[in-house]
Amino acid sequence: MPGHRIETVAYGIGVVARSVAVPAPGIDTAAHGSCQVTQGIDTVACRVGVAAHRIGRVACGVAVPAHCIDTVAHDTGMVVQGIDTVARCIRIMAHSIGVLAAVRTIHTGTAAEQTSPVR
């Protein structure tokens, strides 16, 4: 009977359709779960981004004193170099004065010997 066959086919299609429809809620649930996981990953990524930004700001804040410390160290180094230069100049002057004094002593001694009545 054609009518019976159509109903049977329709029934069979309905069964298949119901069987296909059953996984749909499962797929929706899985999709919802995946969305929740994705949102969680986004939240973590956002928090990591915020933390990285804060670390960057702290690093920037730390870098500023580091630059100041470098500048102070450089200036201190320049002062020390200046002190070393002055000390070197004083040593050279002292050496020169010592040489002049030695020359003068020799000259004076020679003159004294020449004018001394005691031979």
Image (cartoon, helix red, strand yellow):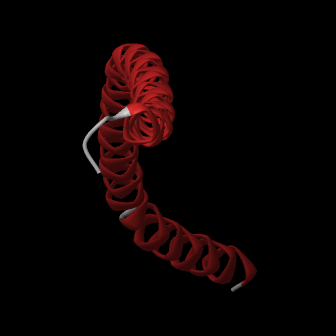
- 82 or 90: nearer the viewer: 90
- 64 or 5: nearer the viewer: 64
Residue at image point 69% right, 73% down: 3
Image spot of residue 92 (x, y percent): 49, 35
- 29 or 11: nearer the viewer: 29
Image spot of residue 94 (x, y percent): 40, 30
- 64 or 41: nearer the viewer: 64
In the rendered structure, the answer to whether residue 108 lies left or right of residue 33 reads: right
In the rendered structure, the answer to whether residue 118 lies left or right of residue 56 reads: left
Residue at image point 59% right, 74% down: 13
Image spot of residue 79 (x, y percent): 42, 17
Q: Answer above or below: position of 63 versus 29.
A: above
Q: Most extreme residue toward the left, as rendered?
A: 118
Residue at image point 69% right, 86% down: 1
- How many labels, in total? 0
Residue at image point 40% right, 45% down: 38
Image spot of residue 39 (x, y percent): 37, 36
